[in-house]
Image: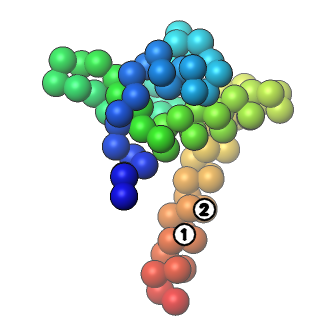
Amino acid sequence: MTDRHHGVFAISVAAEMASMEIQNLRVYERRGLLQPARTSGGSRRYSTADVERLCRIGELLADGLNLVGIARVLALEDRIEVLEQQLTDAG
């Protein structure tokens, strides 16, 4: 089984998978919307989870949210995921 958080895709591949421009991925990283892994040489490596997040960013942009709004939505969705996992673990 593969770890969906393990960075394996180069920026060009991740951009293509998410139907985005490479420069947008760099902007989203600078804005803190995602943090791809880095190789020892400093190259970005995107995971399956990162690509899923990029697709979610694209959906939110299409809905008319700006990057500040998207950051808030993603933070809330991340928190919900943590709480749901805690409930699962406790039950």
For image coordinates 35% across by 36% down, the residue present is 7
Q: Is residue 24 left or right of residue 49?
A: right
Neighbour class for label 2 at 10 Å: few (<14), some, many (≥20)? few
Q: Nearer the viewer, residue 84 or 2?
A: 2
C-alpha span from label 2 to label 1 = 5 Å
Question: Would residue 10 appear left or right of 19 to someone viewing this image?
Answer: left
The structure residue drawn at horizontal position 57% and vertical position 40%, both measured from the top left corner, is 52
With respect to residue 27, does 76 lie above or below?
Answer: below
Residue at 46% over, 81% down: 89
**What percent of the width, then of the height, locates residue 69?**
70, 34
| Extreme residue in the bottom direction | 91
Q: Amino acid at mark 2?
A: Ile
* Figure quadrant of residue 61: top right
Residue position for label 1 = 83
Furthest residue in direction front, as rendered: 1
**Residue 65 appears in view:** yes
Q: In the displayed structure, would residue 20 be above or below residue 58?
A: above
What is the x, y in percent for residue 66? 72, 25
- Residue 46 falls left or right of residue 21: left
